[in-house]
Amino acid sequence: MQALETETTIEVNFSPLTRRYTLEEFWALPEPGDRARYELIGGYLFMVPPRNPPHGDVASRMMKTLMEFLIPNRIEGDVHFPPEPIWLRTEGSTYLEPDIMYVSHELRQRMGDKRTSADIVFEFLSRSTKVYDQTIKADTYLALGVRELWLVDPWNTIIEVRYASKKGEMLVWKAIKHSRGHHAKSRVLEGFEVSVDKLFAGMM
């Protein structure tokens, strides 16, 4: 069989040395396929692989726990999940999709119709996305003014709660890791806590 030679143009560019995207250019990109998705940070493009189980089950349990706290306590605010984004149209445009985010009534009023931050973001780690979620994406949330970040790791049965703080003039995360037998607690939503054992029961 005769081999064929074909020439194509690769239009999606991931190098920060050669290309920065506006939001409009980002939104116009073709779907990457294979259940992957793109995210944009400071105009730079990132390929995010598909999430691995038990991502969906853990997210569902956390959503239920959060709503069971907010509704009976009559706490105003919105809870969002993908494809709802945090996005920023600046010289370095940004578009991220948190797994779950809580936006208080006060923050929503300040932001208006542009969701540029959140009070709390929840990310549920997969083996395929763990490093990205713990580093690049987490630090971007910090820069965007997210006050609290929950990194939920079903593989090691750990809930890591990070709080925005400062070291001198530099923004930093302070983190507390909660393992089995403990409860992860929020500082932003006073009284909200999650049992590590209950969240991961029967999963791993």
Image (cartoon, rainbow, N blue to C red):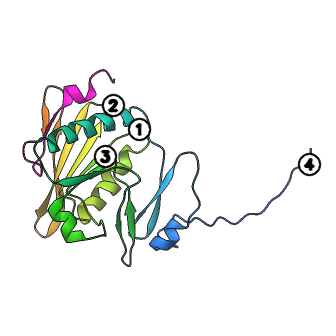
* Residue with the mark numbered 1: 127
Quadrant of the image occupied by residue 61: top left
Q: Residue at x 16, y 44 (%)?
A: 70
- Depth check: give the residue in front, 111 or 54: 111
**Mark toward the start of the polypeptide (1 vs 4):** 4
* Residue with the mark numbered 4: 2
**Mark toward the start of the polypeptide (2 vs 3):** 3
Tell me whether the residue at label 2 lies in contact with that at label 1, contact meaning CB atoms closer than 8 angstroms.
Answer: yes
Q: Which residues are magenta?
A: 185-204
* Residue with the mark numbered 3: 123
Q: Residue at x 24, y 59 (%)?
A: 118
The residue positioned farthest toward the top in the image shown: 202
Tell me whether the residue at label 2 lies in contact with that at label 3, contact meaning CB atoms closer than 8 angstroms.
Answer: no
Is disc 4 placed on a helix, strand or loop? Answer: loop
Quadrant of the image occupied by residue 54: top left
Q: Position of residue 150 (x, y in %)?
A: 23, 46
* Residue 158 visible at all: yes
